[in-house]
Image (spheres, helix red, strand yellow):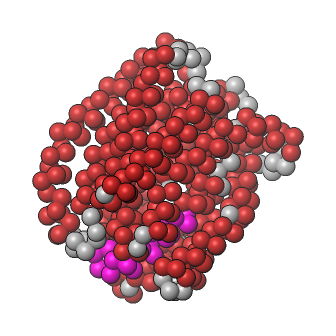
Amino acid sequence: MQILGTMIGLFSIFWVAGNIPAKTFAILGVYQVISGIMLVFSNTGLETFAIRNVLAWREEKKYEKIKQLVSQAILLRFIVSLVLLIPAGTYAIYISINKFNGEYLDIFILMALFSVIGAVNNSIVLLLRSFNRYFTASLIRYSISVFSRFIALFVFIKYGFYPYIYAIVLLPVIIILPSVFMIKDWLSFKGILDIKQLTSTLKESKAFLFSSYVSYSYNHMDQLIVSIFLSPEFLSSFSIGKRVLLFSKTFIENIFDPMIQKLVQYKNKKTVITQKLTKIYKIRNIIIGASILLSPILLLYIDDFILQINLKKYLHLNYFIIIILISQIMHVGMKVNYNFISLFYPASLYFKLTIFLSIASIISFLTLIMIDVRLIFAYTGISYFIMMLYTNNIMKRKAIL
């Protein structure tokens, strides 16, 4: 389902982008910026705290504690998202006036409003993962996404771009309904407003909260900077690149995240963890080897591919796609150790990792903009490579548990 969702998502983006002016597609880039602000800064760290603890609590039969955490995480996401409508709305007004001559403000405001629902849905998906229900979370996300994208694409073909935009913006409403159904057994109003307990949990999860904020710099800030300082036409091309980057990252995460998350249930069994981690490393190495072997095919045919799907009008897109997909080899290389450290090492160390990755991303991103904008996406590969070396060093120096 994930592969199907990825293929249909890319096909939808390529089809729409190929049939509208480059500047018009920048509207979707603005949507990515707004939804990124809402997703990242509404994160309270409670979902990551749940991912680290829920499986262990289930083993200890602490069911009420789990219900309380799940309910508080979703409630806080909603409240913080409402507050974030202020900066998101301010950005929408600025972009409308300065990049689109005052047009599309109603669409941009609507994007901010419905991104609140998207943020809550993101919280639920993360909480499902804390129960190691990666398949369920992915099935919900991609099955509904596939269905919705078919509808959105039909709307585009039948009625044009602007109705299509409204269909995309309304997508979170469709996705959240089955998500709530899957998590409903772990929702409870009992103790949800226990301020003393909530404060204590937030103190324990504060490193994850700050890590989420720091992660904005290497996951979303690039598109924010491009939307403010560069032309809408460049934002359009960059936004297509970001979609390719998102799909490739999601594909990798859905391979490794469930395998590493499952290790939490063996938290006190060092030998078992070591054995299973060795198997995960073997899978990682196979994927890296296969990716390296397939890279020459990408280099040979990327220009023909872009021409065939009518995307030649988008600036530097061939460079963007090549660099993004090759950079994901580095992502695979650092993914296992990075996830393992986030789950088993002190939260303070995970926070340091995100700061380190953030600094590497910002420096390389800004440097590449000044050198050659065609290389702009190489910042992902550079930062992943640096993080791969750093996490390898941590795993060698520090004991697993």
* Viewer-side residue, 230 vs 202: 230
| Front residue of this view, candidates 346 and 228 | 228
Residue 88 horizontal/vertical position (percent)? 62, 68
Task: State the residue at coordinates (39%, 87%).
Answer: 159
Residue at point 49%, 40% (across, down): 357
Q: Position of residue 236 (x, y in %)?
A: 37, 71
Q: Position of residue 378 (x, y in %)?
A: 33, 49
**Magenta span of residues:** 15-35
Q: Is residue 135 left or right of residue 55?
A: left
Q: Indicate whether 233 appears above or below 133.
A: below
Q: Which quadrant would residue 201 be assigned to in this image? A: top right
Q: Residue at x 40, y 35 (%)?
A: 386
Judge left or right: residue 269 versus residue 222: right
Q: Main secondary structure of the magenta part?
A: helix
Position of 37 compared to 149: left or right?
right
344 or 154, which is in the foreground?
344
Q: Residue at x 73, y 31 (%)?
A: 62
Q: Is residue 183 visible?
A: yes
- Extreme-top residue of the structure: 271
Looking at the image, residue 271 sits to the left or right of residue 124; the answer is: left
Quarter of the rendering occupied by the C terminus: top right
Q: Position of residue 158 (x, y in %)?
A: 36, 85
